[in-house]
Amino acid sequence: MSRHRNVRGYNYDEDFEDDDVYGQSVEDDYCISPSTAAQFIYSRRDKPATFAEPLEEEYGYEGADDTADYFTSNHQLTEVDRARLNSCLDQMREVLAESVPEQTMVQAVLDSKFDVQKALDLVLSQGSKKNVKTKNENAVIVGNTTKGKTRDSQSARMESEIVPNITKMTVSGKKQSMGFEVPCVIAEENGHANTSQKGLLTEDASVASGTLEAVSKSTLSPQVGQVSEEQNMVPTPVKKSSKAKPQIDVKAELEKRQGGKQLLNLVVIGHVDAGKSTLMGHLLYLLGNVNKRTMHKYEQESKKAGKASFAYAWVLDETGEERERGVTMDVGMTKFETKTKIITLMDAPGHKDFIPNMITGAAQADVAILVVDASRGEFEAGFETGGQTREHGLLVRSLGVTQLAVAVNKMDQVDWQQERFQEITNKLSQFLKQAGFKESDVAYIPTSGLGGENLVTRGQSSDLTQWYKGNCLLEQIDSFKPPQRSVDKPFRLCVADVFKDQGSGFCVTGKIEAGYIQVGERLLAMPPNETCTAKGITLHDEPVDWAAAGDHVSLTLTGMDIIKINVGSVFCDPKEPIKVCTRFRARVLIFNTEVPITKGFPVLLHYQTVSEPATIRRLLSVLHKSTGEVTKKKPKFLTKGQNAEIELQTQRPVALELYKDFKELGRFMLRYSGSTIAAGVVTEIKE
């Protein structure tokens, strides 16, 4: 055995001392893939690199003799210079393809002393002065097609396939080229005078995204990549139209789209375990929105999990964790129809740990259903201090909801007693009046979520019918008055969620608070103050050409990095942007707070879908509750029930509007250590 190496005792680490990258050879300093290497290695399309070989033999361009003359007579080039020239020409062809004669490109490279960026600038500026007719007219170059004759045939074929598609993609008077906006529009919005692009002919080249990718990966400097990107946005052969979006009659279109039915956003709120998800799940099942097969599956699964009574709740509680814990954690959203309304239903969580999620749902709602548990002890637990019934009622009123249906749930557990129903409604009506609800805007309905009684049809139980003659829950929802939509105002959408799309770009979801949007429009995101293009709009899982205020939509966006967008960013009209600040003044109403509010008090600002740490920077004045007059200037602290004007400072910039201009975007809530301490409206934006 002595002649064999001692395998067990051998120290392998010595062989790989410097090899700390997996898959790296010992000799190499770095490792690159063959495809990356190919971009950096000069190859004359797999021919021997004979630098003296004239270009026309390989590429078959017209004007070959002139090119040869440039090499020899006009400029005495060394072999190194010829190599540099060939390399520059290759890079320029990636951008310009055959839209510019060889001779012009060679001259531009030599004039710019082998600087590709300058050469491209020269060629483009020349192109705007004189219309260059090339051998291959109306060529649409797609991806990295091969040179010479093959490219001619391919581009001719691709043109016939692509140009009609591009024409189809032009929506509502806005030109859109292969997912890019027309450059003259972009240039003007960015404040650049883009003369070179305006002068280019359509046959000069519509360079598609494949070429852009190839150029950006090449050895060009970042500036050259920028040039190619500008080229990428050359107009398609479409008739010119005005840049302004054609004015559609949104109100008429909305009525037409909804078949005369009005849109209503409804949020379901209430204390944890009041039966919100079960109530709405059963309602959806009775309306036929959930088929029998699916419902049977939920029943079997919930029995297996030992939660047979949760079957209807599983219609809206879809995640595994929600089903396992038996509580709603996020806002579930679905759609159903009544006789006169199209309802977007939001099922908000009741647990106090998920109040921020509940605020997000309530901020997007027009009307609400407050679900309370009629069982002995359960109603009291939810209504007294520490329960969520009071807090939810205050929150929805502060967020602009004025119409409320109170579903007194689980009435079957108290044998439909009229006395118990009266006891609950008396307590609630007193509280809701204090919260700011008008008695005429609140309705009380006895229901049973599990039994399905008095949900879609009026109750049949004799115990109920002998004393209750009012509406069932569905009739009450149908009788809600729809709010006025701000379709005439500039476009505003607050982002509720961001996710990557399957294709190019990414998606954002949210409710359109004001204005309307059409496919192909430019949008401004605040923050981060960047523009993008709306490539697609989805409403209730169906693609549409436009959407208006009140719609919960999903927008597919291109031209911006997904990393820059956060939940809470606001998309707006670039011509009328939303204001962004870190300091603003507001009028607030202080709720039940154990700690007096002083200068420097830390709070959590909840605004639309934003949750942002903030500080009360100044206490300006205490105001009279009804008249709004100043009763005390510069108070030292604020306590429960006071109406005051304060100045707030946020950690990061937030996009806000004044309450008098946009009610929906001027309301906010303040929370401290797990409870809501104030509601407010923005009166002045400082920065």
Image: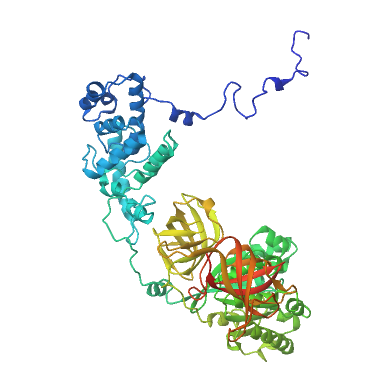
Which quadrant of the rendered structure holds the N terminus?
top right
Measured along the vertical axis of the image, is residue 145 above or below residue 326? Answer: above
In the rendered image, residue 570, in percent from the top left (x then y), is placed at 51, 62
Asked if one can make out residue 281 in the rendered structure from this viewpoint, the answer is no
On the rendered structure, is 565 left or right of 150?
A: right
Given residues 445 and 228, the one toward you in this image is 228
Q: Residue furthest bottom?
A: 466
Q: Residue furthest front?
A: 633
Given residues 474 and 515, the one toward you in this image is 515
Colour logic: rainbow
Measured along the vertical axis of the image, is residue 387 above or below residue 13? Answer: below
In the rendered image, residue 27, in percent from the top left (x then y), is placed at 58, 20
Given residues 10 and 2, the one toward you in this image is 10
Asked if one can make out residue 449 in the rendered structure from this viewpoint, the answer is yes
Q: Where, by quadrant of the figure, is residue 153 drawn?
A: top left
On the rendered structure, is 243 left or right of 450?
A: left
In the rendered image, residue 674, in percent from the top left (x then y), is placed at 71, 67
Q: Residue at x 62, y 66 (%)?
A: 605
In the rendered image, residue 569, in percent from the top left (x then y), is placed at 53, 60
